[in-house]
Image (cartoon, helix red, strand yellow):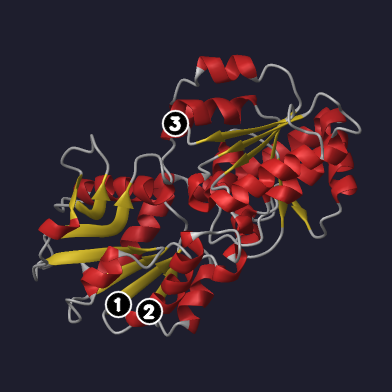
Amino acid sequence: MSQIRAIHQLLGNSTPGYSVSNYALALQEAFQQWRFRSTIYANTVAPNQGSHVQPLRKFRPHSDELLIVHFIMANEVTAWLKQYPEQPIILIYHNVTPAHFFKGVGGQYAQGTALAEEALFSFQSQTKLALAFSNFSAQALKAAGYTNIKTLPLLMPTTLQELAPDSSVMSAMQTGPNLLFVGRIAPNKKCEDVIKILHQYRQIEMSAHLYFVGPTHHTQPYTDWLYDFVQQYELEDAVTFTGYVSDAELAAYYRQADYFIMMSEHEGFGIPLVEAMRFDLPLIAYEGTAVTETMGGAGILIHQKRYDVIAALIHQINSNTDLRQKIIEAQRQRVQTFAPDKVLSQLRAAMEELL
């Protein structure tokens, strides 16, 4: 009989609306449904998180507790772990964007990613199970010396699709076509390439608009450079940077957009790709890293960044209802892979030996 009575999670910052925090909360709910006590411990706890999240400083591990560590950056959690070198853990690897992407434009984020790459080599001996969301991420764990590695999709509840969308955003996006990018505004995302696509597409469709939905403060020098980049192309009236948005606003952007564009050159999974598929939003994404795996043959993968060709492709899809519907149908099939019940079954099977 299992001696484990609790499954707790550790993460650096618990911020509502951010992917790692959302994932931890979804896991917590699942663990409680499995009849385990479960608390999230974070170094920084956002207000109004109630009993779900507690300060890391209050936590002391016990032998009947299973500990899950969310690894994305070198932070107070990795420092805390060094106090308990004999403590067995499950490491969930959210991938680390290589530091070279942030050179000159990443501010403190560049230093943090470099430290994270080093810190990943510190916990192999106490990691009893390492979980990755893609084979691409699993290879990084293998290269860092981890052995018991299992790959499974990221748990993503469908609550975003069930939300009533924000009415003001819906009204503001009545015209179009609307191109959408969702995610951190960061150098590895290659947001400038999406702007170049818009520039080319507006040669065909002058009313096209591009929305960048996601936080900008992590890499402000890069964001400032993007503002200048938009001005160089004289697209100030055609590009919107929203910053952080609520879930209701995010749902509205997905519902009112016509295409989701991702030119990122480093992804450990690609949460917005799955979200866009759930909203029947045709995907156009640059191949490589985990993007190809996440799309799984759905959407349209771009092998070369020929912006005029991509713009012509968007126009072709926009002009051909049958083609657009075929893309959406393929995405509907693919997104079933990420159904929460299926993912939870895989997660339970992966963890079973430790419970």
Q: Residues within 10 Å of mark 3 (few under 14, many from 20)?
A: some
Q: Earlier in the sequence, mark 1 or mark 2?
A: 1
Of the 4 image quadrants, the one containing the C terminus is bottom left
Relative to 324, residue 303 above or below: below
- Left or right, 293 with respect to 232, comes to left
Label 1: few (<14), some or many (≥20) within 10 Å?
A: many
Disc 3 marks which amino acid? Asp
Residue sitting at 63 percent across and 17 percent down?
Answer: 172
> Is label 2 in a helix, a strand or a loop?
loop
* Mark 1 or 2, closer to the camera: 1
| Residue 337 coordinates in the image, percent (x, y) | 53, 50
Q: Secondary structure at mark 1?
A: strand
User: For the point 61% across and 63% down, which residue is it?
Assistant: 104
Residue 176 falls left or right of residue 106: right
Residue drawn at (82%, 28%), measured in percent from left and top?
321
Q: Amino acid at mark 2?
A: Asn
The mark lying in front, picked from 1 and 3, is: 3
> Going by the image, does 155 lie left or right of 136?
left
Which mark identifies residue 148? Answer: 2
Quarter location, residue 238? top right
Q: Which residue is mark 3?
A: 247
Closer-to-camera residue (347/266): 266
Please give the residue where the numbered disc 1 appears in the rendered image. Answer: 127
Say if residue 330 shows up in the picture.
Answer: no
- The number of numbered badges drawn on the structure is 3
